[in-house]
């Protein structure tokens, strides 16, 4: 009765909802849900002054019902009230009310996280909640709220990949397909008026690093979608995105400009994120994607980096499909001609993976690799030098025993000569450190050969 007779000002006072939230520590959530207090909370969500406090209160109520079997009656009361919030999403986005959008999304995410088991049990009944969360992701143009939903998609995946919930999986697989398309859009770097602009964060390295970290979190959600949909279906979405860029902008790309490169880089990044989930026997989609990747414009640093990292993630697959090796490997080799330290590090890492996983296939190139190795070694940072040393040593170690002496001499004579040259000139401390570095790579090469037998 007190709540029903509140003045207009008191009914939207945040302290009212903070008070109710505090009661939830002691009072069963069902008591609140079945009282006029729930109407007060819902009304509070419609007012800018009380929105945050009311949203937190409703979110706590949802979290208090995580034991779904014990709380089923309360959930039946709360579900339609929570679903009413979906109608607010579009308006909040159009009004650019970021805080309001966050508050509503948090409530929906709290409900989803708490009731995931019921979603798997009754997918038809709870589908509107799943769709509401998907809409939050789709309308999140500034990437302010999508992270609130990551736990829900992960937990739902955990259930849907169980045989017991196969029916729910069938009913909800289309949601995950839509989610993949949404994630591809969110993975894109910011647009710029200058198609050649690479620094899209105005020199703010911290902001750029946060974006990169956020992309990897979205990559984890992509993997969740893969497990629900199957990898080939996810890769098909990636393939279609690459084809669309080629159709829309491919003919406009020049040696100095790649228009809208962000919409090409994003699906390549997504492909890389899925890499560990793709079986090397996949013969449907990857044979269509790989020829497109080697055609990615090399003059754009972020595109080249994305392609290199993707190739490096699929070397086991390439080893099982040798017809794709040559062009991929040459793309990696050509990437060492850049001055970009980031590209060099990525190329060295991918080079190592190719050498390790495709060592038998690279045998015919073992002599050519020595010339490349000797030429490129001084250009690389120390960690990358170690990686390409491990790579060439792996290829050498995989060759026939009768060729061992000839190949070891071929590789080690230049290393010894470099060692001697630096020893003769090692007077200052820096030169002595360089000498130590050369000795390390010489010994590291032999160590890898020994480990490989």
Image (tube, rainbow, N blue to C red):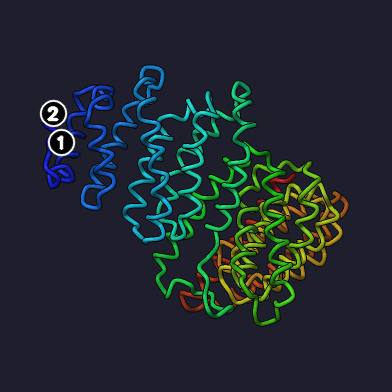
- Quadrant housing residue 195: bottom right
Counting every numbered tag in the picture gives: 2
Q: Are marks 1 and 2 in contact (CB under 8 Å)?
A: no
Q: Earlier in the sequence, mark 1 or mark 2?
A: 2
**What residue is shown at x 68% (from left), y 39% (from top)?**
230
Q: CA distance from mark 1 to mark 2?
A: 16 Å
Q: Nearer the viewer, mark 1 or mark 2?
A: 2
Residue assigned mark 2? 1
Query: Residue 410 at x, y = what percent?
Result: 79, 65
Query: Residue 400 at x, y = what percent?
Result: 86, 50
**What residue is shown at x 72% (from left), y 50% (from top)?**
236
Q: Element type at marker 1? A: helix
**What residue is shown at x 36% (from left), y 20% (from top)?**
73
Residue assigned mark 1? 19
Q: Report the side of 156 relative to 334 (left or right).
A: left
In this view, the residue in front, 108 or 188, is 108
Q: Is residue 111 above or below residue 28?
A: below
Q: Which mark is residue 430?
A: none
- Quadrant housing residue 110: top left
In this view, the residue in front, 179 or 124, is 124
Q: Quadrant of the C terminus?
A: top right
Number of residues whose C-alpha sits closer than 10 Å to that of mark 1, classed few (under 14), some (14–19) or many (20 or more): few
Query: Residue 87 at x, y = what percent?
Result: 41, 46
| Residue 150 visible in the snapshot | yes
């Amino acid at each position: 009765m007190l709540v029903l007779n509140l003045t207009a000002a008191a009914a939207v006072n945040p302290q009212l909802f903070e008070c109710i939230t505090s009661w939830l520590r002691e009072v069963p959530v069902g008591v609140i849900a079945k009282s006029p207090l729930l109407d007060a909370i819902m009304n509070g969500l419609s007012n800018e002054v009380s929105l945050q406090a009311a949203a937190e209160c409703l979110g706590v109520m949802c979290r208090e019902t995580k034991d779904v079997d014990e709380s089923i009656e309360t959930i039946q009361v709360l579900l339609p009230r929570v679903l009413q919030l979906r109608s607010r999403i579009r308006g909040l986005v159009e009004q650019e009310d970021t805080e309001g959008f966050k508050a509503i999304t948090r409530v929906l995410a709290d409900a989803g996280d708490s009731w995931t088991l019921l979603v798997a049990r009754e997918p038809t009944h709870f589908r509107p909640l799943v769709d509401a969360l998907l809409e939050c992701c789709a309308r999140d143009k500034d990437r302010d709220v999508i992270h609130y939903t990551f736990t829900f998609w992960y937990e739902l995946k955990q259930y849907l990949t169980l045989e017991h919930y196969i029916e729910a999986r069938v009913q909800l697989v289309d949601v995950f397909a839509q989610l993949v398309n949404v994630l591809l859009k969110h993975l894109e770097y910011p647009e710029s008026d200058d198609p050649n602009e690479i620094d899209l964060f105005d020199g703010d390295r911290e902001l750029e690093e946060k974006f990169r970290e956020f992309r990897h979190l979205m990559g984890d959600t992509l993997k969740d979608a893969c497990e629900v949909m199957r990898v080939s279906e996810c890769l098909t979405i990636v393939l279609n995105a690459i084809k669309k860029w080629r159709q829309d902008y491919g003919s406009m790309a020049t040696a100095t400009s790649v228009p809208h490169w962000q919409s090409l880089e994003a699906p390549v990044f997504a492909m890389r994120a899925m890499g560990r989930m793709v079986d090397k026997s996949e013969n449907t989609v990857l044979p269509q994607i790989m020829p497109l990747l080697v055609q990615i414009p090399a003059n754009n640093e972020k595109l080249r980096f994305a392609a290199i990292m993707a190739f490096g993630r699929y070397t086991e697959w390439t080893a099982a499909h040798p017809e794709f090796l040559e062009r991929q490997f040459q793309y990696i080799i050509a990437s060492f001609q850049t001055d970009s330290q980031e590209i060099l590090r990525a190329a060295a890492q991918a080079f190592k993976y190719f050498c390790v996983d495709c060592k038998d296939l690279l045998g015919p190139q073992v002599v050519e690799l020595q010339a490349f190795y000797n030429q490129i070694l001084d250009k690389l940072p120390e960690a990358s030098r170690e990686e390409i040393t491990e790579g060439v040593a792996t290829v050498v170690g995989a060759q026939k025993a009768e060729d061992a002496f000839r190949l070891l001499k071929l590789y080690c004579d230049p290393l010894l000569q470099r060692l001697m040259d630096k020893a003769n000139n090692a007077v200052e401390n820096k030169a002595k450190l360089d000498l130590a570095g050369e000795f390390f790579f010489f010994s590291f090469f032999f160590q890898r050969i020994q480990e490989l037998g």
